[in-house]
Image (tube, helix red, strand yellow):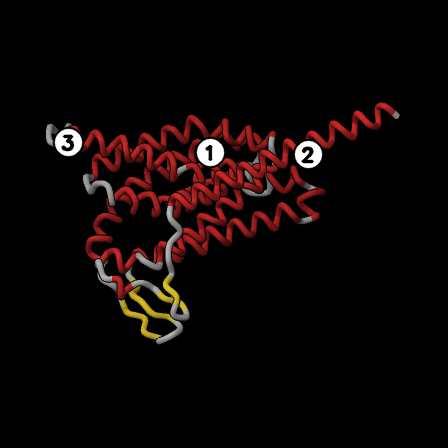
């Protein structure tokens, strides 16, 4: 126990909590959006149990991932379709590809639902069309998929399991405290639901980019980087990702303010006449 109480581990814990908070924002956004698909009376319970189960499974997944990443770092096979598809594929590559495709599919499906006529005419019914158990399962599944990115990033800071587990538990507690507030905000400002889904879409693209360098980073061999039609699959940097998110929020805020200004001017013009 005394070995864990060091300044290095304390610093790592603080850094990991910050990392989990930043990387977990899109996860919290998804939980807030998805929970609204459950019956209204059960939405709060869905968020609570969805987060509790997901955090518990994330700690278990962390332990398993540490073992798998160490034992399965070496590529399963090398793609050698010259000029079309080249590079190494290991365990992390498969995880990122499956997770990225699933997140993109979910975001596109929900965006299509928001744009459908049925959504506009039967919004309340549509948003409560899933059972509480099904929504909890979706939240848990997506939480685990989101966790791959944060777990792999966390492992770059430290491989001390108790410190990593503590950071996950603390971030889970923060999600429990913030989930209802984020959901209430989205309920009052529906345009941010669309914004959140587009952020999820970008997250899916980020994960696919990470798949391109998973094997090369694990083996410290640039020759293993995935190449599609001769072009290397390069991941989006975290700085670029968060800059894109900030720009999306800025555009939405400015557009909302401008729309309100135009509505006020039209109302004033009608009042004069």
Note whether 93 is above or below 66 in the view shown.
Answer: below
Which disc number belongs to residue 47?
A: 1
Label whose residue precedes the other's in the sequence (1 or 3): 3
Q: How many marks?
A: 3
Q: Residues within 10 Å of mark 3 (few under 14, many from 20)?
A: few
Task: Tell me the quarter of the image containing the C terminus.
Answer: top right
Label whose residue precedes the other's in the sequence (3 or 2): 3
* Along the line of sight, the residue nearer the viewer: 243 or 216: 243
Q: Residues within 10 Å of mark 2 (few under 14, many from 20)?
A: few
Which residue lies under the disc numbered 3?
Answer: 4
Disc 2 is placed on an element classified as helix
Q: Residue placed farthest to the left in the image?
A: 2
Instruction: Report, in whole angstroms, how far the alpha carbon at label 1 lies from the one at label 2.
Output: 33 Å
Disc 1 is placed on an element classified as helix
Which residue lies under the disc numbered 2?
Answer: 259
Q: Position of residue 37 (x, y in %)?
A: 56, 40
Q: Residue at x 36, y 63 (%)?
A: 232
Instruction: Report, in whole angstroms, how far the alpha carbon at label 1 lies from the one at label 3.
Output: 33 Å
Q: Are marks 1 and 3 in contact (CB under 8 Å)?
A: no
* Circle nearer the viewer, 1 or 2: 2
Q: Residue at x 74, y 27 (%)?
A: 264
Q: Position of residue 233 (x, y in %)?
A: 38, 61
* Circle nearer the viewer, 1 or 3: 3
Q: Residue placed farthest to the right in the image?
A: 273
Q: Residue at x 39, y 57 (%)?
A: 97
Q: Position of residue 217 (x, y in %)?
A: 26, 56
Say which quarter of the image contains residue 185. top right
Disc 3 is placed on an element classified as loop
Q: Residues within 10 Å of mark 1 (few under 14, many from 20)?
A: many
Say which quarter of the image contains residue 211. bottom left
Note whether 70 is above or below 179 in the view shown.
Answer: below
Instruction: Report, in whole angstroms, how far the alpha carbon at label 3 lies from the one at label 2.
Output: 54 Å
């Amino acid at each position: 126990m005394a070995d864990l109480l060091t300044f290095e581990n304390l610093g790592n814990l603080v850094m990991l909590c910050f990392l989990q908070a930043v990387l977990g924002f899109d996860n919290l956004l998804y939980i807030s959006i998805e929970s609204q698909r459950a019956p209204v009376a059960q939405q709060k319970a869905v968020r609570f149990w969805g987060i509790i189960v997901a955090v518990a499974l994330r700690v278990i997944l962390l332990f398993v991932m540490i073992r798998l990443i160490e034992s399965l770092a070496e590529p399963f096979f090398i793609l050698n379709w010259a000029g079309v598809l080249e590079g190494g594929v290991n365990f992390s590559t498969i995880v990122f590809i499956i997770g990225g495709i699933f997140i993109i599919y979910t975001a596109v499906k929900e965006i299509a639902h928001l744009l459908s006529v049925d959504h506009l005419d039967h919004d309340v019914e549509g948003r409560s069309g899933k059972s509480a158990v099904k929504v909890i399962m979706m939240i848990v599944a997506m939480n685990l998929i989101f966790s791959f990115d944060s777990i792999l990033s966390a492992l770059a800071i430290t491989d001390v399991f108790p410190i990593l587990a503590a950071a996950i538990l603390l971030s889970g507690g923060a999600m429990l405290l913030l989930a209802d507030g984020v959901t209430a905000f989205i309920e009052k400002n529906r345009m941010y639901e669309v914004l959140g889904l587009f952020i999820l879409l970008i997250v899916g693209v980020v994960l696919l980019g990470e798949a391109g360098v998973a094997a090369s980073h694990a083996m410290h061999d640039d020759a293993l980087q995935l190449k599609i039609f001769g072009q290397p699959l390069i991941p989006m940097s975290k700085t670029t990702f968060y800059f894109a998110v900030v720009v999306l929020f800025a555009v939405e805020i400015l557009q909302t303010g401008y729309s309100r200004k135009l509505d006020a001017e039209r109302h004033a013009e009608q009042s004069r006449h």
